[in-house]
Image (cartoon, helix red, strand yellow):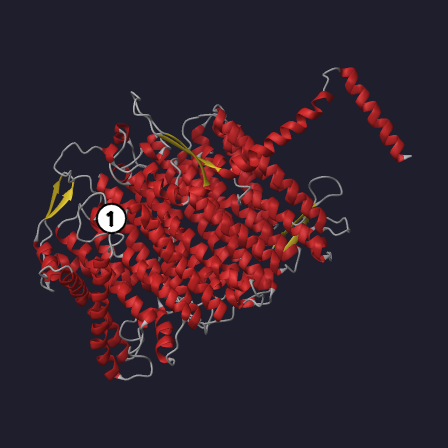
Amino acid sequence: MPFIDSSLSACLAIIAMWGLIGLAGLLRRESLRFVARTLFPLGALCSVALAVVAATSLGTPAEQAVLKIGLPDLPMHVRRDALTSLFLLLLGAASAGISIFAAGYFRRGAGTDAGLMCLQYHLFLASMGLVLLADDAYAFMVAWETMALSSYFLVTTQHGLPEIRRAGFLYLLIAHIGAIAILLSFGVMQGGSWQFTFAAMRAAHLAPHWAAAAFLLALFGFGAKAGLVPLHVWLPEAHPAAPSPVSALMSGVMLKTAVYGVLRVTFDLLGKPEWWWGIVLLAIGLFSALYGVVFAAVQTDMKRLLAWSSIENLGIIFTGIGLAVVFHGVGMNALAALALIAALYHSLNHAFMKSLLFLGTGAVLHSTGERNLGRLGGLIHRMPWVAWLTLIGALAMAGLPPLNGFVSEWLLLQAFLFAHEVPKSFVSMLLPLGAALVALSAALAAYVMVKFFGVIFLGQPREPTLARAHDAGLLERIGLAALALGCFALGLLPTYVIGALRTVVERLSGASLPNTKAPWWLLMPLSGRQASYSAPVLLIALTAVVMVTVLVVRRLYHHRVRRAAPWDCGFGGLTPRMQDTAEGFGQPIRNIFGVFFAMRRDLPTPFDRAPRYRVTVGDRIWQGLYVPLGALVQRIADTFAWLQQGRISTYLLYSFITLIALLALML
Amino acid sequence: MTTIEILTQALELITTLAAAPLFLGWVNQCRAWLQNRRAPSIWLPYRGIRKLFHKDAVIAESASPLFRVAPYIVFGAMAVAAGIIPSMGTRLPFTIAADAIALVGLLATARVFLSLAAMDIGTAFGTLGARREMMVGFLAEPALLMVIFVASMISATTALPAITENLATQELALYPSLAFTAVAFILVLLAENARIPIDNPATHLELTMIHEAMVLEYSARHLALMEWAAALKLFNYACIGFALFIPWGVSTRASGPVVLLASIPLLAAKLAVTGAGLAFIETMSAKLRIFRAPEFLAVAFLLAVLGLLVHLLLGA
């Protein structure tokens, strides 16, 4: 095709294709077969194409173009540079697996019909692509809003249920409060030129306090999308409400557009970030990480658990960015690059791991109709494919070597190791304590993942209906396997990933890692610091030891196995109800981190006929911040409610007074 | 890779695999003496493992393949970890593949698989043990990481051999930060290895047990591997302690083969003293209620963080 001569136009063509695929869904709205078996695989093909284009264009110089669409005199500027390519790669690679899974996932029409869903889904993908490519505030905001709206409709697919409508409303509300902040941030960044292209913003010279204001507004806006505490309240509501492939897209990909936004504004548009911005990012990131994982540990709904875990992971990503900003601000370039690479690496990792886990819950949900952990269990026997593939995601999420979650954690801790060299007294003392919090969050993540996997897939089925559970279909298995493969690849080949990320970081911030002469299998980010890690060697060693042990045991001893009932202490009557529940698994966390929770315990009295023990775990931030805020807004609204008389003559009077006032002002 | 590097690596691995049950036997013997009991033979752990390997494996009907794979993975992780820790020499070629953070990661891998296997059968004991193990783990792991962090900061690297070499070769200097972290490390060692006051390796009382509850469903060769892995874990933790806090006498880059040979009896001496000390701590303290375990481990974590602060304040 002659008109696709650059990777930028190729990306735009793919985004347009997504739009067309979405519209094609409207042609035969009721035909699930057409939508699921034709359109979604086509969308996945586009995703793969986007990933390939983005990957090949990572190292190439930036390209830009002006599209003559939109309002007159307001053309859309688009630009593709290394940072955009990286996030397009993330979008393409993760959505490829998700779309394939979705092709097998959407079955019967509950709520929104298939064709409309297809439009919303592909519009969501296309708008995320446009957010990454936009090069002026206008295009960015249009794409950003399209992303928010299409995902809102996807969240409310099952709009028949009131709690889902409520979750959708909360999501929409916070998305728009965030969007206002982003818009204001662009307004500050144009710096009096009244040019809203990103090029003008790069050229504008802002006074330090205006730059700080722009940064804080952007942080608020993008933080609302990323689910940073205290703007996280929508996330545990909206992500579980959506169908699982959409949850996977939102958690795995959409949250990363917020990471992209913060990086774009901080390092690119504002140019020279101040070191103390990093402290703000770091503090919010660390708090979100701990807050998210602690809440994840006490959840009893599997998708809600994953949603809270997303808050944790975004917290860790922002911690990395914060550390990078601090290092960058004081001129420690190599370490800034290392911390930024850790943050970007974790973004990639999280896109794969979290999508994999969300899709796993989707398969479980389809097969059992249950989201409540208290009614699941033992599914590894009934759904081995889903169980083993989800196990890979869970181990990666727990940050265990040699999978991918460990690599980004390792890089972040390496960066923290030298945080005390920051030439700011007091700050240099506090920074390394961040490593303690990262370590605590990571260890808690392992706790959460053992709970997640163990309660759903291991043990005995907690309900008799689970015996009818069936494994996922072929397309779903392919989707899951593709994402699991991504986890493996990112874990085993970190040198290649870091090689790509180095270019991105160098183009973005000017900071670069020193060149190290390490072979492909050895990860040694800072030479002379003598820290290295090699996932392939570790995996080979581990496999070798395990294989040798198996062979030796088989050779030297017999391998007879007898099956028997589990040990019941001689009392008999061991039932699945005696297993630890999700609530039980959360109990130590509720005890240790009691201050985080607004807990209410309803205890039975000794005279109850049917004693019930109930504990509800609430979010203190919801009750301490949002409920009073909502009440305040309500009070203000009530105060002005007398303006609304409901009579047309009164409203005409208002218009008349306004006109007079305006005329008086103008003349 | 030179001959001496390969020799050191092989020596470390073989010694750990072979001597780990012996160390456990020594601790048990010391404990019995301190408690005025007649001590069992120091070889008892070996006999136990040998006996278990010869038995028929009985596996619960509801066990999945994960249950049968887990003992091999746990054992494998502990064996690989043994190859990273410089207990006798610092010339370990394998350590470029895994530094101290990866070592913590490996130990976490073993713990996660052990816990998942415990949950696999679906009995009350298994899940209870898994939950408690993960609770101890998520408190102990960051403490251990902070301990390693302080030592890494002193040496500006996370590679264990480099840390050991740095600490072993400089003139005898007392690091106040390492004093704090050493105490934190001892607390972590007790908790992670299911010793009193967190867990009692000799008990099968359901209200208190952690480790034993998890391996309750295992029998025969699987149990043998689990027990051996537990012995390896204790041995590994002791060696991490030596590598960070009493590294003197290990064979370093500058030393010849004689030092490597001499490091074998030296390690034996260190282990003998440590084992006796461990038995002493266990005899002198009572088991904590499980609800008090978080406080115990929070102390370890805070001590490690305090060590970090002391290092940053004093630069030592």
In the picture shown, does residue B18 fall above or below A563?
below
- Asked if residue A665 lies left or right of residue A318, the reply is right
Asked where in the image residue B277 lies, by quadrant, the reply is bottom left
- Asked if residue A325 lies left or right of residue A391, the reply is right
Dot 1 crowding, Cα within 10 Å, few <14, some 14–19, many 20+:
many
Q: Nearer the viewer, residue A456 or A490?
A: A456
Q: Chain of mark 1?
A: B
Q: Nearer the viewer, residue A482 or B123?
A: B123
In the rendering, at what x and y percent does residue B96 appear?
A: 36, 69
Residue occupying the point 38% across, 72% down: B163
In the picture shown, does residue A616 fall above or below B52?
above
Q: Let me know if residue B98 appears in the view.
A: no
Give the residue furthest to the right.
Answer: A667
In the rendering, at what x and y percent does residue A134 appear?
A: 63, 48
Q: Which residue is mark 1?
A: B210
**Secondary-structure class at tag 1:** loop
Q: Nearer the viewer, residue A127 or B223?
A: B223
Q: Nearer the viewer, residue A5 or A310?
A: A310
In the picture shown, does residue A471 fall above or below B147?
above
Three-letter amino acid code at the position of disc 1: Ile
User: What number of labels is visible?
Assistant: 1
In the rendering, at what x and y percent does residue A52 appear?
A: 49, 53
Asked where in the image residue B103 lies, by quadrant, the reply is bottom left
Asked where in the image residue A175 lies, by quadrant, the reply is top right
Residue occupying the point 50% across, 35% down: A238
Residue occupying the point 58% across, 59% down: A325
Q: Let me know if residue A563 appears in the view.
A: yes
In the rendering, at what x and y percent does residue A597 appear?
A: 45, 39
